[in-house]
Amino acid sequence: MPTLKDVSQKQMNAIWLGLQHTNKKTRKKYFPQIEKAVNNGDLSKQQYALMKDRMLIDEGKSQLYGSQIKNGKLYKLDTPNKVNERRKEMGMKPIEQYLKNFNIEFKIE
């Protein structure tokens, strides 16, 4: 995995985007390098959160950050009452605000 010393931010984002939208086997293989890139400041915490949620869904688990939606519905969310705390740590907007973009109302059941 290159770093920002090797490539531009635009190129790093393109690498992340390709991995985010590849198959689950490839995503899982490269996720440790994504984590390292985030820790080094080469990718954002938000990019980490998006990929982490997608990987959890790949495994049939609940997502942590509420970033994944399908057919107008939010995928199952782990501890919904804590989601905004987790989102804030990752530099993400509150889930209610995010879901308005998809005309989804957030309700804790």
Image (spheres, rainbow, N blue to C red):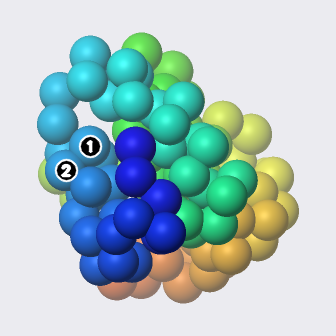
**Dot 2: element:** helix
| Element under disc 1 | helix
**Residue that mark 2 sits on:** 18
Q: Mark 1 points at which residue?
A: 19
The image position of residue 94, as x and y in percent, is 65, 77
The tag on residue 64 is none
> Cβ–Cβ below 8 Å for labels 2 and 1?
yes
Residue at (59% x, 42% y) in the render: 35
Q: How crowded is mark 1: few (under 14 residues within 10 Å), some or many (20 or more)?
A: some
Q: What residue type is labelled 2?
A: Gly
**Left of 34 or right of it: where is 7?**
left
Type of amino acid at the residue the image marks with label 1: Leu
Q: Position of residue 3 (x, y in %)?
A: 47, 59
Location of residue 22 with respect to 84 vertically, above or below: above
Q: Is residue 13 left or right of residue 72?
A: right
Answer yes or no: is residue 75 visible. Answer: no
Q: Which residue is drawn at 39% across and 30% down?
A: 30
Q: Residue visible at 23% across and 64% down?
A: 14
Q: How crowded is mark 2: few (under 14 residues within 10 Å), some or many (20 or more)?
A: few
- The quadrant in which residue 90 appears is bottom right
Residue 70, above or below 8: above
In the image, residue 66 lies at what x, y percent? Answer: 53, 54
CA separation in Å, label 2 and label 1: 4 Å
Residue 26 located left or right of residue 90 = left
